[in-house]
Image (cartoon, rainbow, N blue to C red):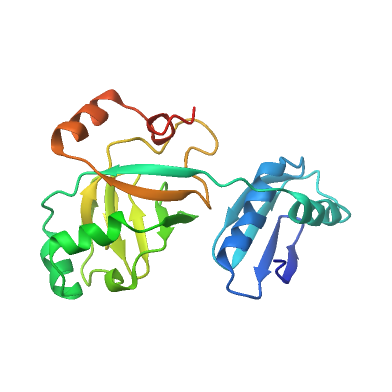
C-alpha cells in the first residue's frame, strides 16, 4: 500500500519526509529502503513513526530527489524474525506493573511470550530499541519518577511499547527482565544490529542460560543463526 507523504528540504542540509497516515509498517519500509540504498548524497537516515529525516552531504543536488523517490518506490524489503531470550527477574518494577495491569506475574509473562513484537524505532537514547505490538492489557504509563541508572540489556514496557536498553542510562520504563545478547556492534556504523521491521518473539530463559549467554558475549543475530 502506497502512502502519501510530503517532502521538505532544509538548506540542502537534510530532507524531511512527513507521513500523512498512521501506517507504521509501510512507512518503516520507506525508511529502510532509503537507508539500504546507500545513495551517495545521503549520510544518515533516521526514521520515526511519522517522519523520516535524511541527512544530506555536499554532493546533493535538487535533481537527486527523483532518485530518492525511486528508491522508496522500488526497493523490496525483507523482514527478519528473531528470538529474543529474556530472563524475567525480580526487578522491583514488577510490583507496580502487577498492580497497574491487575494481572499476576505469570499472566503477564504469558502475554509477552505470545506477543508478536516489531522493532518500530531506534533511539532517542543511544541504542534504545522501541518495539510495537505490546498487548493492550500491558500498556501502562511511564514511571512518574524515572531512575538514574537502568542496566544495559534491560527489557521494559511503557505506554504502547516494549523496549530494550542497549546501554546503561537513565530511564522511566518498567523493567521486567534482562536480555543477555548484544545488540550493539561498536564501532560499526550503524552500531545497532536490529533494524526497523524486525519481528521479535520473546523466549523465556533461566538464570543459568542467562549467565551462559552473557559470558559468551554473543550478539542477537548470532543467537538466531543469522550471521
Q: Position of residue 110 (x, y in %)?
A: 23, 58
Q: Is residue 75 left or right of residue 103?
A: right
Q: Residue at x 63, y 62 (%)?
A: 26
Q: Residue 204 is drawn in which quadrant? A: top left
Q: Residue at x 39, y 36 (%)?
A: 220
Q: Quadrant of the N terminus?
A: bottom right
Q: Residue 123 is drawn in which quadrant? A: bottom left
Q: Position of residue 19 (x, y in %)?
A: 65, 70
Q: Position of residue 199 (x, y in %)?
A: 46, 50
Query: Residue 48 versus residue 57: which sits nearer the camera?
Result: 48
Q: Is residue 57 visible?
A: yes
Q: Residue 52 is drawn in which quadrant? A: bottom right
Q: Is residue 178 left or right of residue 202?
A: left
Query: Residue 113 versus residue 74: which sits nearer the camera?
Result: 113
Query: Residue 185 versus residue 90: which sits nearer the camera?
Result: 90
Q: Position of residue 226 (x, y in %)?
A: 48, 31
Q: Residue at x 56, y 47 (%)?
A: 79
Up/down of 156 relative to 99, above or below: above
- Count of numbered badges drawn on the protein: 0
Q: Is residue 174 visible?
A: no
Residue lying farthest to the top in this orientation: 216
Up/down of 145 relative to 189, above or below: below
Residue lying farthest to the right in this orientation: 63
Amino acid at each position: 500500500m502506497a502512502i502519501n507523504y510530503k517532502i521538505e528540504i532544509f538548506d540542502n542540509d537534510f530532507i524531511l519526509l512527513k507521513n500523512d497516515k498512521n501506517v507504521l509498517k509501510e512507512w518503516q519500509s520507506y525508511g529502510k529502503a532509503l537507508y539500504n540504498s546507500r545513495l551517495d548524497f545521503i549520510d544518515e537516515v533516521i526514521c520515526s513513526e511519522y517522519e523520516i529525516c535524511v541527512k544530506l552531504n555536499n554532493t546533493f543536488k535538487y535533481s537527486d530527489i527523483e532518485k530518492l523517490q525511486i528508491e522508496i518506490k522500488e526497493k523490496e524489503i525483507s523482514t527478519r524474525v528473531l528470538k529474543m531470550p529474556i530472563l524475567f527477574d525480580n526487578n522491583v518494577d514488577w510490583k507496580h506493573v502487577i498492580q497497574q495491569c491487575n494481572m499476576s506475574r505469570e499472566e503477564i509473562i504469558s502475554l509477552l511470550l505470545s506477543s508478536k513484537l516489531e522493532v518500530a524505532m531506534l533511539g532517542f537514547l543511544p541504542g534504545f530499541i522501541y518495539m510495537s505490538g505490546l498487548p493492550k492489557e500491558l500498556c501502562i504509563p511511564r514511571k512518574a519518577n524515572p531512575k538514574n541508572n537502568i542496566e544495559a540489556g534491560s527489557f521494559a514496557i511503557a505506554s504502547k511499547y516494549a523496549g530494550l536498553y542497549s546501554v546503561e542510562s537513565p530511564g522511566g520504563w518498567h523493567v521486567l527482565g534482562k536480555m543477555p545478547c548484544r545488540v550493539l556492534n561498536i564501532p560499526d556504523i550503524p552500531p545497532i544490529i536490529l533494524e526497523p521491521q524486525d519481528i521479535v518473539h520473546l523466549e523465556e530463559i533461566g538464570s543459568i542460560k542467562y549467565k551462559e549467554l552473557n559470558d559468551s558475549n554473543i550478539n542477537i543475530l548470532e543467537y538466531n543463526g543469522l550471521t
